[in-house]
Image (cartoon, grey):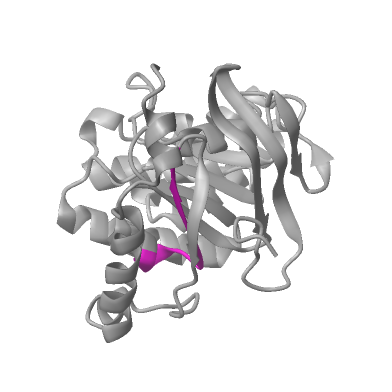
Amino acid sequence: MRPDTALRDESPVLLEFREVSFGFTEEEMILDGFNLSVGAHEFVALLGPSGCGKSTLLNLSAGLARPFAGRVLFQGEPVAGVNRNVGYMTQGDTLLPWLTVARNVLLPLEIRRSPVASRRAQLAAALSLVDLTDAAAKYPSELSGGMKRRALLARSLIYDPPMLLMDEPFAALDAQLRETMHAELLRTVNRTRSSVLFVTHDISESILLADRILVLGGRPLTVRDVVCPPFGKNRDLDAVRSSVEYARLEANIRSVMYRPKTSAELSLAAVPA
């Protein structure tokens, strides 16, 4: 089995890339015959340097971009437009400053024209999930950085998507707050049983959060290694950080990410952007 299609367990496949090719031009290919699969309830980290194409994988999964060739499938069906079965959380603060937390979190339901009668219960559940019930009437300017992140997470989850797409969502936070959000995210997705496709260039973050790490690099993008941290769904992050296995994984991944480029990779990198 090819490493970029390997699943950690026998979970049903939720998202699948089959021989997907994509680029801004045919001469500048970001993906060329790329394969990927994500199982139900699986947390997959896409780890690689900035600009290597990780966000492109999220945009294709969300239906915000279309492949030149190959197919992107979600729950066995081709992604042929905006994928409304995923929640998408980016690094940026996309809360609307003139709306309260409640109104911001409700936006996806309003856009979908969900039944008004059910919205209050869905809002209450989403805010409770991220411990923001008491902040429902506040405006974004009144929130801390961590509260803003939790509000964005609630907005991504309010329509109960089977998968979350997360593009370096905690990169702008300080180290202490990022640790808090790591624990918050794991607690939340364990309760919702959502799958997660998580983009990061932080080795530590990938080991702490993921069931499976795809170490990415090259141009076109390739999977250099697949790592499955053995810490389980209900991992204690403090215990993970102090473990011998954590240190071993970090050293091994670092050696893969920063190994010298092959002659083929150097040749591709020399092609003008």
Please name the residue shown 36% across and 60% down the image.
Answer: 256
In the image, residue 20 above or below residue 80: below
Q: Looking at the picture, how far across and down is residue 115, in whole percent?
A: 73, 33
The quadrant of the rendering that contains the N terminus is bottom right
Residue 62 seen in render: no
Judge by depth and name the residue closer to the eye, 191 or 49. Answer: 49
Q: Looking at the picture, how far across and down is residue 154, in whole percent?
A: 47, 45
Q: Is residue 215 magenta?
A: yes
The quadrant of the rendering that contains the C terminus is top left
Please name the residue shown 54% across and 37% down the image.
Answer: 58
Q: Looking at the picture, how far across and down is residue 150, in whole percent?
A: 37, 47
Q: Quadrant of residue 181?
A: bottom left
Span of residues in magenta = 207-218
Please name the residue shown 21% across and 45% down the image.
Answer: 173
In the image, residue 199 above or below residue 225: above
Q: Quadrant of residue 205?
A: bottom left
